[in-house]
Image (spheres, rainbow, N blue to C red):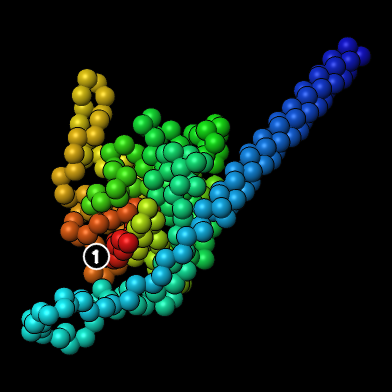
Amino acid sequence: MSGSVRGLSDRGKTVRRIVLILLILAVLGGGGYFGYLKYTQYKADKHQKAFEDLKEKAFVTTTPVQTAAKPTEEPGTTPEPTIEPTGPSAEEMLYAMIAEKYEDFLTIRPDFGILHKENKDIFAYIAIPDTIIDYPVLKSEKEDYYLHYNLDHSKGYPGCLYIQNCNSTTLDDRFTIIYGHNMLNGTMFGSLKKYSDPDFRETHPFFFLYQEGRVMVYEVVVVSHLEPEHLLSEDYVERNGQWVFDAFDGYETARFLKRVNEENPEKAYVSTPAPTDDDTILVLSTCGEGRRYTVAGKRVLDIKD
């Protein structure tokens, strides 16, 4: 009898030891994970500060808002008869509206000389009014380099906003994708998900892309979660056992809309009228919960100095 009691007592002690060890491991593991999160947050905040400092240095160029003017005539020449337009064109009206509401985004532009001193891979700059999305856009010869590396080439989060090698730095492809991390603190593309809210879309209808001597305005036309498959997968071919980009076939926007209608028909937003393959589309893409979150804009203005 006493042996049985002693055996039960020993087993009880063993169970308590195991439970204690598991609790200690859980505490240590939780503390380690918490420490990792804190360190990741520290690095993200540090690099966000670097982006903000760069913006403060780079945005020093002021360009006057354009105004419509009649062409000048050479002295001594007889002007050719012209038919006066009945009113401003749709593009002129759109420009006037944007210039009135977003004047600073048209007139205060980045100095790309300053940006290139920071990183020569910067080829554009994106800004969405009244949001934290206000960053340079980069392209590296190494595919997806800036998914893993920061502006100063240090490795880790938050990386940079970037395009892949299939897209041109001219931003004149009919379908361009800018990638960025979905950071928990809302930086980079962590705030894109706000576009799922109709009220947010209504108050944030445009985003701006800058290049040297150029500002482009995009109107948000599609917002959707999608499966993680590459948006340009149909433009890739297999060569020597690897998938490589072949060429744009001109149907990228149509396929994009087809995927939106098939993969997220109830929750997606598509403008009326919907974009077409004749439009110049720029997609902002980030990941989340195993899916891709996309906000697509249609270029509505392309202003060159």
Q: Residue at x 19, y 43 (%)?
A: 248
Q: Residue at x 30, y 61 (%)?
A: 304
> Which of the two residues, 36 or 9, is positioned nearer the viewer here?
36
Can residue 31 be spotted in the picture? yes
Where does the image place residue 140, in percent across and percent down from the top left? 39, 35
Q: Secondary structure at mark 1?
A: loop
Residue on which the image places disc 1: 274
Q: Residue at x 46, y 53 (%)?
A: 111
Position above or below: 73 against 242: below
Position above or below: 164 against 197: above
Q: Residue furthest top?
A: 3
Task: Tell me the quarter of the image containing the N terminus.
Answer: top right
Amino acid, disc 1: Ala
Q: Number of callouts in the render? A: 1
> Which of the two residues, 197 or 50, is positioned nearer the viewer here?
50
Residue 120 falls in which quadrant of the image? top left
Position above or below: 258 against 23: below
